[in-house]
Amino acid sequence: MLESKIQSELQNKVNKKIAPLFSKYNLDFSSLESGMKWKPIVLIIGNYSSGKSTLINELTGTDIQRTGQAPTDDAFTVITSEGAKRPKEVPGSTLVNDDQLPFVKFKKYGEKLTSHLCLKNIDVPAFADMAIIDSPGMLDATTEKDRGYDYMEVLGEFAKMADLIVLMFDPHKAGTIKETYSAIRNTLPEKSGEDRIIFVMSRIDECDNISDLVRSYGTLCWNMSQMTGRKDIPHIYLTYSPNLTNTLTNADLWPQERTELMEKIHAAPGLRLNHILEDVDRQVNELQIVCESVAEYTQRARKLFWKIGKISIVLAVFLFCFGDVFTNSLISLPQQTLISALREGNFTLTNLILPFIFLFVPLILGVLLFNNWGLKNLLKIALAAPQDLVSLDNEYRRNLWRKMENTTKTILSNSKPKDIWLGHSGNLSKIRRFLEGDLKKYYDKLRA
């Protein structure tokens, strides 16, 4: 399959050319690496009783997840078809230690998370090339202590991996949950693109009548405007259980909405390669702007070094030649200067002792001046206005900089004087060649 071949080629290219640079600049490569190594992922999130399990059971054609009005599952559950490669159920402790899977990075969140993480291997051919991740229901008031791990941070990591995120609401809690607000307002915009998120109001078959449904839908739209901070509300899909139990007819429930939702979810695998390219593009551009700023800083530092160095060298040469002349005239030392010894033809190595002292003292003082005054002052200026290190001539680069500014400041703050001689300009050239050459070729292959 062409897309699988391109994905494999891209992964090898990124690992070979770009991964070492992520390490050099202390940037996290794990999310990019994990995103390239596995199959397409659909992440299902929402508050308790929002219909997540019902939707998953319908998508898989199995009763794989428990359903009910009360909380039924507090785990991140990966549902896919792995055939005979894996057992029917794989615990989280195994998932986070398997380098072939993209879950290794979750090991850092500790046992509380791994004990609430599992993979269910289902015998459904359609899921051989995709996976669904069910998530714990969002709560209205919770802390990290309640769950034992940072739920929003973990959710953000799963969102980074997902090709499609389905955020579900039910008519009775139309977007008022605290964690839902935090996810929509902060976590999802930071970790995923808007085009990867779809909003769903489920269980609409439980509304008593059309007026009740319209009222719930209007409430959700209002809450969405408050949570997103936007006036233009994204499309909200409507869905329901196929087994209707109330007085609303099938026509009342807009079955085309439900059909379109199912088609969108099943189409997610087709977006995988494009999303991988987008992620690589975005994260390598983040790397580039960090490298660019550090390269500019080191270039300025080297210019300052050579400026101080030239003055020190000129002074050192002058004192080497004439320093002993001044000391001889002031304190009669040395008894014979280097120049007079050369002129009179009785030069010995002892005539070089004082000139060499005069030679090295300005050079040492120059290095001390650069390290303890020049470089520190340059660093202070750079940290006060780091944006001056890069060109921010368009909104895309300004957004990149807002995200990576603190990372750049941390790298500069931790830099040593010797670091100004590292090959940041060469690294920047490698990154640019990858973006303008390799990555462009893969985009062209995808469009072909």
Image (spheres, rainbow, N blue to C red):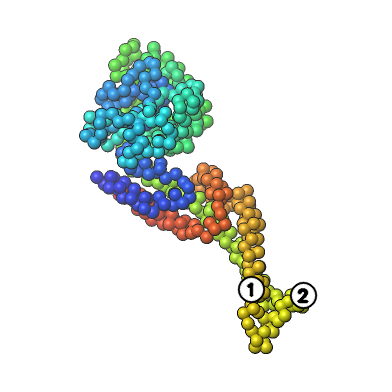
Marker disc for residue 356: 1
Q: Quadrant of residue 45?
A: top left
- Left or right of 314? Residue 208 is left
At mark 2, the secondary structure is helix
Identified at 48% across, 47% down, the residue is: 26
Given the image, on which type of amino acid does mark 2 rest?
Answer: Ile
Comes first in the chain, label 2 or label 1: 2
Residue 391: give x, y in percent of width and height: 54, 52
The amino acid type found where label 1 is placed reads Phe
Q: Residue furthest right?
A: 330
Q: In the image, is residue 54 above or below residue 1?
A: above
Which of the two residues, 194 or 18, is positioned nearer the viewer here? 18
The disc placed on residue 331 is: 2
What SS does tag 1 mark?
Answer: helix
Crowd band around label 2 with a 10 angstrom C-alpha radius: few (<14), some (14–19), many (20+): few
Q: Is 359 rendered above or below residue 21?
A: below
